[in-house]
Each structure stands twice: as structure tokens, then as C-alpha cells.
Image (tube, rainbow, N blue to C red):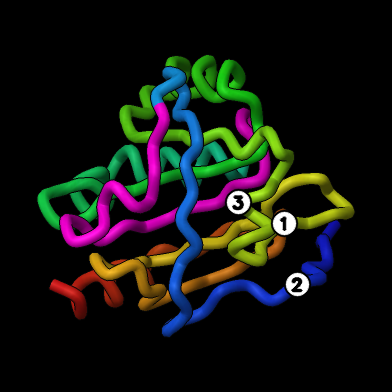
Amino acid sequence: MTQTIHQTALSAGDVAPDFTLRDQNGTPVSLAEFRGEKNVVVVFYPFAFSGICTGELCEIRDDLGAFVGDDVQVLAISCDHMFSQRAWADKEGYFFPLLSDFWPHGQVARDFGVFSERAGAATRGTFLIDREGVVRWSLVNEIGQARDFSGYHEALAALR
């Protein structure tokens, strides 16, 4: 089943809205803390423990050097509660931030234009944000459609 996105997602050239969310360990993480320091790839996913989401985050885990390094940081975001994300991270060995957009429910996903009201969850939005806070590449897939990170890798290489 596909979900309809009723809003416009951010695209290349847009300034990414700042946010502060708690990670799976309860630590606050802000997009602004990376400004001037690192590029950031923001990966919205619908649901912890679901098949496609697990596959996508395992791809990040298994190629972590392409997503976390001296010049790039991955921030994975869903509307799941912090405790669900902690259990999932522990089970799958995710050692990168899984941020909870639980309350106000889906506000950051809404700000990025990737919240599905019908599903009550984020769609599969991926945004590469440069050190100045500008979106340089984006890809938005419906909830049931797995994303392809190859475009991200090409866009990141162009920023380096």
C-alpha cells in the first residue's frame, strides 16, 4: 500500500529547518550543532522494527564510513518513541543517532515535508545538508518503497 504525501518536501537549495530531538539514549541532538563543521544526511524512516526500515538502516550500519566521518554525520529520524528506538538500536547494532520525532508528533518530519498524515509517520525522506545548512540533494520515497542511497553517495562526493 502506498501513502500519499500531501505536502512539498524540501529540495536542493532550501535551507533545512533546525531541530533538536533526543536520540535513542536520551541525548539531545541538534542539526545546528553540525553547522560549519560537517555535512549531515538526515534519513527519515517510518517505523522501527519494520522490514524495509531495518534493511535501510542496516545498509547504513554496514557502510558506516560513508555516512559518519570527519566531514559527514547521519541522523536517522522517525516518530517512534526513544525507548523503541533504543531497543531496535541494541538489537541491530546501530551506533549512530536514531532521533525521536515522537512529540510533538512528527513535527520535524512535517517541517521537512515528509510526514504522512494518513500513516501517522514519516515517509522515506533523505536529505543531504551541507555545512551551511542548505539542502544539496534529496530523495523522497513512499513508505512501502525502499530508497536507493547511490544518489546520496554521488552528491556527498560532489561536496567533498
Residue 47 lies in the magenta-colored region = yes
Q: Amino acid at mark 1?
A: Phe
Farthest residue toward the bottom?
A: 13
The amino acid type, in three-letter code, at marker 2 is Gln
Q: In which quadrant of the rendered view does residue 114 lie?
A: bottom right
- Is 42 on the left or on the right of 83, as rendered? left
Q: Which residue is mark 3?
A: 108
* Mark 3 vs 1, N-terminal side: 3
The residue to which callout 1 is attached is 115
Q: Determine whether 26 is above or below 55 in the image.
A: above
Circles 2, 1 touching at the beta carbon (< 8 Å): yes
Cα distance, mark 2 to mark 3?
A: 13 Å
Depth check, mark 3 against mark 1: the one in front is 3
| Numbered tag placed on residue 72 in the rendering | none
| CA neighbours of label 1 inside 10 A, class few (<14), some (14 to 19), many (20+) | many
Q: Which residue is mark 2?
A: 7
Q: Which callout, 2 or 1, points at the residue further toward the start of the chain?
A: 2
Viewport quadrant of the N terminus: bottom right
Give the Cα separation between the discs numbered 3 and 1. Answer: 8 Å
Does 25 sit above or below residue 144?
Answer: above
Image quarter of residue 151: bottom left
> Where residue 83 sits in the image (x, y, percent)?
58, 16
* N-terminal label among 2 and 3: 2
Tell me the element at label 2: loop
77 relative position to 93: left or right: right
Q: Position of residue 13 (x, y in %)?
A: 42, 84
Q: How many dots with numbers?
A: 3
Q: CA distance from mark 2 to mark 1?
A: 8 Å
Q: SS for tag 1? A: strand
User: Which contiguous range is marked in magenta?
Assistant: 28-50
Task: Tell me what residue is drawn at x 20 percent, y 80 percent.
Answer: 158
| Residue drawn at (46%, 34%) of the image | 98
